[in-house]
Image (tube, rainbow, N blue to C red):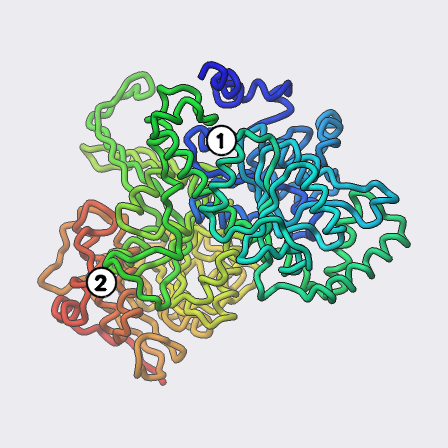
Amino acid sequence: MQHVCKRILPFFGRNTRSSFRGYSSVDVEVRDHITKAITKNQPVIALESTIITHGMPFPQNLRTALSVENILQRRGVVPATIGIVHGKLIVGLSDKEMEYLAQTDDCIKASRRDLSYVLSKKTNGGTTVSATMFAAEIAKIPIFVTGGIGGVHREAEKTFDISADLTELGKTPVTVICAGVKSILDIPLTLEYLETQGVPVISYSKSKDFPSFFSSKSGYKAPYNLENPSEVASLIYNQKNVLDLKSGVVVAVPIPSAFSADNDEIESVIQQSLEQAKEQGIQGKEITPFVLESVSQISKGESLEANIKLIENNASVGADIALEYCKLLNNAQQSPHTQQDHPMLQSSSNIDELLSDQRNVTEKTSSDYSPRNGTFSGTKRPVVIGSAVLDLKTTIEEERSNVAEATNSGSVNISVGGVGRNIAEFLARCDMDPLFITKLGRDMQGEIVQNEMKNLNMDTSGVYWSRVYKTATYNVVTSEATGELLLAVGDMKINDSLSTSLITSWEKEIRNASIVVLDANLPKENLHTAIEICQRYKVPVWYEPTCFTKSPRPFMGGITPNIDFACPNFVELNAMHHALKGGQMSNLEMEENLSTSDILKKSIELSKDFRSYIPNLLVTLGKDGLLLVSSRRARFGEGENQSVAYLHYPAVPGHLAPVEVKNVSGAGDSLAGGILYGYLNGYDKDTCIKAGLLGAYKSLKATSAISDEIEPSLLTYEAVQKWANFNPRSLFDSS
């Protein structure tokens, strides 16, 4: 055990960053979240960066890299993309670092032999398979996912051109999940060389057919085949943890059949590309990116799409294997006969700690998620894309003049909010099985938000974890004596960091959604991207403005998007109108003091310019209720007439007014949730609005943003009509 501790502590002890096989922390950095996951036996998968720097054109390179990371995260696996930025070898690149590598021209394709040069020159590098394996072993990451490995080049008997990937596999105990050997290589000689190096080669299929990147069958056989992740995990465990062999493992995953190319056709294209390379004097490590680009051009982009799909498929397979491998590690730790021999342990005293946090191992995915009633309907589900926020409310009991020098007595309450999250919670409480897509930081706040979602049995497969930005947090300080707002601080930078590639990676789910809800915390580029996808597939869009500064975002840049539902208050509507007309609303206009009658008249006037873009405009009026502007494109319910109607609804039935308000933070979100629930259940327009008003009423009387009373029985058609025993007032109706 002492020997094991000495070998592991330089990597996972207190001096994690100070010693990596002789490198200083200036040269090599394993990010903290990677180290933490490894020490706790959470599944981690290494990813290379030449796919970003040399494998694909921009922006497909960045989109694919982020998509692969997101696939792993959704499966409960921690991605660790490896690359070199300004002379530092980093295990766990941030989104910003990947974006930088994706666009910079100052980048070397770095194999093992190039690492010391790139680090000493303080330049940038995309790590190949061999360099990524080397770095993964430093960080003790056992599994690595890539597209395809290098091999023995054609005519190697003349050139001696053999990829460093093969020699690395012979001496570095990392399992490589790939789509086989790239088709441009000499496949039979590559298999022979791997045998000489003592590397097990596994075909992950029902046969021993060895894949060749673009083709599911190369015409050659692997020595073994395995059909499920538990079998592969068992092989890896025996290779590393039982026999302690120092060579790697190749798991060759056939490209999905829908994208598999005919072997003869792809061979013809490759030969054509190789001839071009020879004519242009291209050789060595530059051949592979040149040929792949040429193949993409000759195949009119089809090979690029196939390349992306096979990498994403490899990531899914790798995630399954990593999860099974971690189960074996944890089972071994629980056995008294194997604890001391386990190479992941620092000491026998930390077993409980290592087993205490298996959050990612048991993460539910969208494929096996069940709604609260324990069944999966298989029908279309709503998709909500927006913010999740940790809210802190601090109340000071006694105000002092020198608050900076003294501790003030008071209370601090923590709750989970965010417009998108609140709406998703409302729908989840009503068994509507929403998919909520958001971004959280890898921090304590993010853990709290996710755990609260899990407690509500919400699907968390849409949570994207940031290693750079903190979870959105809002802290408000008030006086208990006067109720006065003393201070408010918000850290919302993570919302602006959401990339459009995150939206496009969920295109399949958006395409199959019953409705897509977008909140204005998303950057305008993301809103435009999501709306464009919805328009392409004729998916209804609900837009939820969050404040007057953000509400104009969909209309910025001269864009006039088609939105089926929008629910602004009057100030937000005014700001949206200014953006539509190419202007910007001033603070003076925001503070304009208008009566309810004036607001109704002006709202009707402003709404006329939105008729072509927003057929269902719902203007919230606080205690004065809601104005519905419904035009001829309205999709509310069935059997609606084709006129433009202006209907004013009171906030609550007369006998319930005035409402004793406990909390206003979730009323608007509950209004949206109730209307959406009615819409998704086929209620008529009037009942949809009343369901929303009932939800808002329950929120006002609750201490949390979404009332615990929200459930399907509260919002049945009969229950809603019984509660809302009133009719709206028609202000104007024109056909």
Does 527 sit above or below residue 85?
below
Residue at (20, 35) in percent of width and height: 482
Does 161 sit above or below residue 33?
below
Depth check: 123 or 575 in front? Answer: 123
**In front: label 2 or label 1:** 1
Q: Which residue is mark 1?
A: 242
Depth check: 504 or 705 in front? Answer: 504
- Left or right, 157 with reference to 292: right
Residue at (18, 46) in percent of width and height: 662
Label 2, secondary structure: give it. helix
- Left or right, 707 with reference to 265: left
The type of residue carrying mark 1 is Val
* Mark sitting on residue 693: 2
Residue at (68, 59) in percent of width and height: 219
Depth check: 144 or 364 in front? Answer: 144
Q: Position of residue 569 (x, y in %)?
A: 34, 59
Residue at (35, 62) in percent of width and height: 567
The type of residue carrying mark 2 is Leu
